[in-house]
Image (spheres, rainbow, N blue to C red):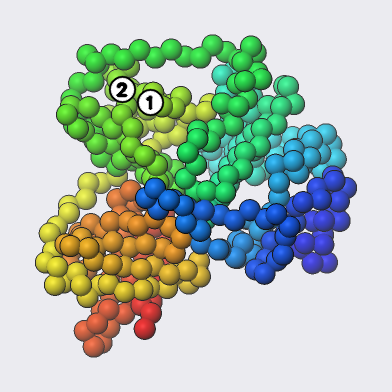
Amino acid sequence: MPYNEYLDQEFFTPLGMKNTGVHYSGIKLENEAKGYTTSGNKYDMSLNWDMSWAGGAGVLYSTVDDLLRWNRGLYGGKVLKDSSLLAALTPVKLANGTTVSPAYGYGLGLANYRGLKEVAHSGGLHGFLTQLAYFPKDSLTVVMFTNTSDPRIIFDPNRLAEAFLWQEMEPQEVRTEDTAAVGKPGDYTGRYDLAGVKVITVTEEDKKLYAQLSGQAKYQIFPSAKHEFFWKVVDARIKFARGDKGEVVSGTLYQGGQEIVANKLPALEILKIKPGILERYTGSYEIPSEKTILVVTLEGNTLYCQPTGDKKYELQPLLNEKFAIPEINAILTFVDDANGGVEKITLELNGSKSVLPKMK
């Protein structure tokens, strides 16, 4: 049976999910939302990515109402047997006996927010972000959709849940700024690998520390205790750890009931390269795995790259032919062809290596 027919027959129709299905290129849907991304102060159409390329990892379209119907069915015994649902809600353990952090079941993120158990998961694609959170004690479901990669609001389901469940929640932790606890701000600066997906970049300006998560704005972090800092714009804090020689080796991010260890990345030695060398790297390169294009441009003495429908990233030179994108921990190496031109880029990102041929 075709995948879309199976899902519709087994799940969507019985649950009354009339606006959910398998997406594909060329599909005609009434009132379909299009994805947008910001470019300066304006919105542009995001990359029209064929969701069928994602397969089971993200091929569905839906609505906030239908996801509510899904959650009611899932936790109401209409989707899984009780034993299967219990297994899905049990934190997975690795072969060495340790529990994955943040806690994760079978496709379900498991957390504790202000004393209440929470089952949640986020999603995202070019021009779209989604959140689905469930608080089992009160059977409260929060669904959030936005058709922009850069929402101008706090896109956090826990903040909405607080409006309904605040009386049942533990009191919010009050953090007080303690300037005497900061020590040497420079000790904490650098890049920290957040679960191999994003990078937290910590910088110092005028003896103040700032933290920036990949793809987000930079915000000041404030000292509250020794080696510990907090954000004022969101309910989050980070606690740094030192190694045997006293150097900062990692930071643990505490947010939304989760604890994620971010190991410090090696410092990059950035070089200065003559513009004449940089000019030869400009052009368009194909990303076969995503069926999109990476455009490399030179502005002044700085090289930039921009994937279709994504933001522009500055390339910082490590060698004449090797460049880094520090904010996403990516390394790009330009490879010459037999005629002295550029044949391709090798891209190292999140532990994998890809080849991007140059387009003629």
Residue 100, x across and y down, in percent: 53, 38
What is the quadrant of the C terminus in the image?
bottom left
Q: Badge 2: how crowded within 10 Å, few (<14), some, or many (20+)? A: many
Residues tagged 1 and 2 counted as in contact (Cβ below 8 A): yes
State the SS at label 2. Answer: strand
Q: Name the quadrant containing residue 58.
A: bottom right
The disc placed on residue 231 is 1
Q: CA distance from mark 1 to mark 2?
A: 6 Å
Q: Earlier in the sequence, mark 1 or mark 2?
A: 2
- Going 61% across and 43% down the picture, which residue do you hit? 145
Q: Amino acid at mark 1?
A: Trp
Residue behind mark 2: 222
290 in relation to 65, above or below: below
User: Left or right: 175 with respect to 66?
Assistant: left
Residue 53, x across and y down, in percent: 60, 65
- Asked whether residue 85 appears in the rendered view, the answer is no
The disc placed on residue 163 is none
Residue 78, x across and y down, in percent: 85, 40
Nearest the viewer among 43 and 19 is 43
User: Left or right: 354 with respect to 78?
Assistant: left
Residue sitting at the far bottom: 339
What is the quadrant of the N terminus in the image?
bottom right
State the SS at label 1. Answer: strand
Q: Amino acid at mark 2?
A: Phe
Residue sitting at the far front: 42
- Going 23% across and 66% down the picture, which residue do you hit? 298
